[in-house]
Amino acid sequence: MLFAQPRQIRPSQPVTTEATAGPGLWVTATPLDDGRQLLLVIDPHLKNAAVYHVDAQTGAMTLKSARNITYDLMVQDYNCQEPRPAALRKMLEVGGETATPGQIRP
């Protein structure tokens, strides 16, 4: 389990802590600019994710978001920039090794 403790953190050098907290849970903590920490907890078995803010002064945790990410992980192309995954796949299938970046063969 990760606990928030007051400490000096330099914003120019972000610190991320990852840990396994129990059977199969993935936990990462990242400092925020306002002295809080962002705590991300993922259960890969259940495909659930939860996001918390942890107050560094009091240690209080506030749940900000939670959701099942099963269907999120099935989406192949959402909010992507060019070239999109399908275009990259097509470029490689056609022989993209001679194509220049950003150029898609017909």
Image (spheres, helix red, strand yellow):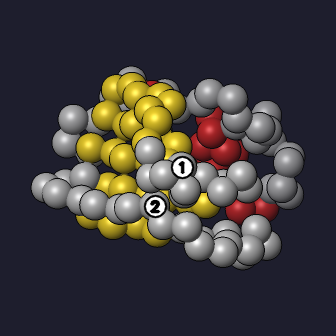
Point 76% across, 68% down: residue: 11
Point 45% across, 61% down: residue: 4
Q: What secondary structure is found at the residue carrying circle 2? A: loop
Q: What secondary structure is found at the residue carrying circle 1? A: loop
Q: Which of disc 2 and disc 1 is earlier in sequence?
A: 2
Q: In the image, is 95 to the left or to the right of 81?
A: left
Point 46% across, 36% down: residue: 62
User: In the rendering, at what x and y percent does residue 42 appear?
Assistant: 34, 45
What quarter of the picture does the N terminus occupy?
Answer: bottom left
User: In the rendering, at what x and y percent does residue 57 appear?
Assistant: 55, 56
Decide which of 52, 96 is in the foreground and name it: 52
Q: In the image, is 105 to the left or to the right of 72?
A: right
Can residue 55 be seen here? The reply is yes
User: In the rendering, at what x and y percent does residue 83 appear?
Assistant: 76, 41
Q: Residue furthest front?
A: 58
Residue type at the position of mark 1: Asp
Decide which of 101, 92 is in the foreground and name it: 101
Point 43% across, 42% down: residue: 61
Judge whether 67 appears above or below 55 on screen: above
**Circle 1 residue:** 55
Q: Badge 2, how many Cα within 10 Å: few under 14, some, many 20+?
A: some
Q: CA distance from mark 1 to mark 2?
A: 7 Å
Do residues under tags 1 and 2 come within 8 Å of each other at their CB atoms?
yes
Q: Which mark is residue 4?
A: 2
